[in-house]
Image (cartoon, rainbow, N blue to C red):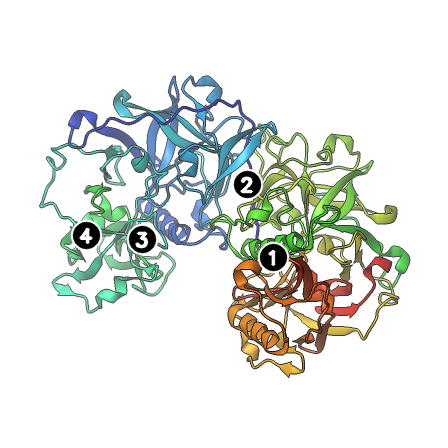
Amino acid sequence: MRQPIQKRKLALWIVALLAALDVSPCNAAATVRMKITHADVGRGLAGRELMQRMALRSRARAARLLSSSASAPVSPGAYDNGIPSTEYLVHLAIGTPPQPVQLTLDTGSDLTWTQCQPCRACFDQPLPYFDTSRSSTHALLPCESTQCKLDPSVTVCVNLNQTVQTCAYYYSYGDKSVTIGLLEAEMFTFVAGTSVPGVTFGCGLNNTGVFNSNETGIAGFGRGPLSLPSQLKVGNFSHCFTTITGTKPSTVLLDLPANLFSNGQGAVQTTPLIQDPAHPTLYYLSLKGITVGSTRLPMPESAFALTNGTGGTIIDSGTSITDLPMVVPGNATGYTCFSAPSQAKPDVPKLVLHFESATMDLPRENYVFEVEDAGNSIICLAINEGDETTVIGNFQQQNMHQPVEMQNLAFVIVTLLAALAISRCNAAATVRMQLTHADAGRGLAARELMQSMALRSKARAARRLSSPASAPVSPGGFADGLPTFSEYLVHLAIGTPPQPVQLTLDTGSDLIWTQCLPCPTCFDQVLPYFDTSASSTFSLPSCGSTLCQGLPVASCGNPKFWPNQTCVYTYAYGDKSVTTGLLEVDQFTFGAGASVPGVAFGCGLFNSGVFKSNETGIAGFGRGPLSLPSQLKVGNFSHCFTAVNGLKPSTVLLDLPADLYKNGRGAVQTTPLIKNPVHPTFYYLSLKGITVGSTRLPMPESEFALKNGTGGTIIDSGTAITSLPTRVYRLVRDAFAAQVKLPVVPGNTTDPYFCFLAPLRAKPDMPKLVLLFEGATMDLPRENYVFEVEDAGSSVVCLAIIEGGEVTTIGNFQQQNMHVLYDLQNSKLSFVPARCDKL
């Protein structure tokens, strides 16, 4: 669910506006030229190895192009070890005086970025990291700048030195590669000394994933506003790739000269560029068909069509070998090959790609290659079998000048976890933690309290189930000055001697983390940052440890800046909140002085997003290996939430005593916990139906069912108000409307709640609300689903349930004064009404 991101501490300058670039189209003198080199040039590779590498890179690239950053890791295969994943490197320089960089040419992404000093979590590169302190033209971009707002899905506002706000970015790729840093403006110098001031680029300070030492970053040539062509305001750009087996550099031109095709060897072909709202960065073409020899293949145009954001045909600089959907059965090489006599060059049929209004008649060397094998020649078709999207790779584009018309759209020194000597059914061994509600002691009026909770719940749903590449989540107006996601804070301490922390209890994530010194980029908090140097029990697991491998995104810290072989993590959330730092191990101290050694947690050094000063981090209570319950090896845990409008603290118990339910006020109910492979962290339940009053609502069980990773019912500590899918919510709402004999309050005055108007301070009868689970019935007390507020001399009585998306979420308001037990060992959830303030 989450992933990591961080920014670094740099000197802050107020930035000037981007200088306008005075480059006129069709003016040869003004054309910006860049030299590019192929990844495998000068490596002395045999033909077979060269083509194998390209096929493997192409398959990985396809996944990187179209998948989200929340997807499974992409492995380019065995050849990725020590081999560049890049295809073509752009050679240019940044700053004044110019500092050279080598950036991967990527028409499949937008942000241009390079690794920068003090680069504490970076991949190795042959060139020095870009040093902003050496450049007289360097400027940081403020949050209010136009450039910071160009792509709000990747930018975020951060405080440097806790005072000045500047623009930072988080950019992730489909193979889970991530770059995090500060968005800056600088002078770019291209070939022949052509310089352009004020180009916006990412100064990468934390960069992890599939990167190699011959690159220093990426040059985004996509269609978004942050791409290099878009920023330079050029009407077009082109590339001309030289033969991959040669040593001659290739060329990229920005804004093309009038004699563009003076060395062309055939008729100029033109085809429209298509836009896909689902992948707006990519360059789509309208491929209509394929001819082999003299035969047009019997396939409908729909085989290549872009349909509702899927399929279609992409032309891509970063893909080596063209991918076609279901071309041939998969094999070890990825190629279809034929055996021929040694050194023979037999005739092969022509291969022609038919586009809308254009024909790409490929020369033989652009779709066939030969290798020698045991005295024979192996002749192979340089095309891969792919998925549903056709991708035209750069092998097929050799010695072809291709302009793109922008204007016309044409982490073993591992400290083992100490065994936790807690026996089940032993009350003295139970670990107890105190919780406080986010709004406790804030003096909020009832209406404001409930509105705040509803807004947090809606934002929480987006944060829980969306990918980190999604659009930012806005909790609404009540977020200003109020905790946005901190529903319940766990009070504990870390280290020896113990240092107090306050962590948000989150059953929807796994990592435990807190902000740590020196905290270059952190949100404000009331407590001091955790100081590892003040703890005698602190240690660092290695990047090869099982603990590090349990993280969704982690890498070995660069020994120049991090302790050698340490685990650097990045953990991101769906609302773009991120934490980046070192995975560490230390002693945790809970309520009543119970201490547990060897707990792994994230020491967050770069933390940004939706966090508030009453929290110092997050306590993951999910189902993954790094969550607190998993690490403590407890068979169960429970929570008991006191009334949200009271001041009494709530309780969390880890490994429960035999008299767990001694203060229970009813029969213990038990229902199975379900696992969802798509979201394995979450606690799913099998909700079967809902009763309002004496009526079971007429809805099929399928309304709550978990289907192929979607839908279902989650019980969540971090969500305040229960949300129901639209159809279910409306049935519940209508049932209350039919059974409550009071006038309904117009929705625009009570949004997002459904409310009734009653006499002042009246407490009218309300029908019962019962949730029916597999093997269990949750008969909610009135105060767990109804609340009252006073308004203009009347009482407004509201149903504390909101309309949500396709997932049903049981929030903590509905769990007040209910002891809820998560039986991890037996995958069951039990609950019973209780006096939580007496627990």
User: Can residue 326 be seen by looking at this rendering?
Assistant: yes
Q: Amino acid at mark 1?
A: Ala
Q: Nearer the viewer, residue 502 or 335?
A: 502
Q: Nearer the viewer, mark 1 or mark 4?
A: 1
Which element type, helix, strand or loop, lies under badge 3?
loop
Sequence order check, earlier mark of 1 and 4: 4
Real-space CA distance between mark 3 and mark 1, rounded to the nearest whole angstrom: 71 Å
What residue is shown with label 1? 454
Q: Which mark is residue 374?
A: 3
Quarter of the view holding residue 706: bottom right
Please name the residue that numbered disc 2 is placed on. 5
Real-space Cα distance between discs 1 and 2? 28 Å
Res 509 label:
none
Number of the front mark, 1 or 2: 1
Marks 2 and 4, the one that precedes in the sequence: 2
Q: Residues within 10 Å of mark 2 (few under 14, many from 20)?
A: many
In the rendering, at what x and y percent does residue 290 appear? 19, 61
- The residue lying toward the viewer, choosing from 223 and 788, is 788
Q: Earlier in the sequence, mark 3 or mark 1?
A: 3
Image quadrant occupied by the C terminus: bottom right
User: Image quadrant of residue 43?
Assistant: top left
Q: Amino acid at mark 3?
A: Ala
Residue 541 makes an appearance in the image: no
Are the residues flagged by discs 3 and 2 in contact, CB closer than 8 Å?
Answer: no
C-alpha separation, residue under disc 3 versus residue under disc 2: 51 Å
What is the crowding at mark 1: few (fewer than 14 residues within 10 Å), some, or many (at least 20)? many
Horizontal and vertical percent position of residue 161? 60, 27
At label 3, counting other C-alpha atoms closer than 10 Å, the crowd grade (few under 14, some 14-19, many 20 or more) is few
SS at circle 1? helix
Residue 494, given in percent of the width and then of the height, sits at 77, 41
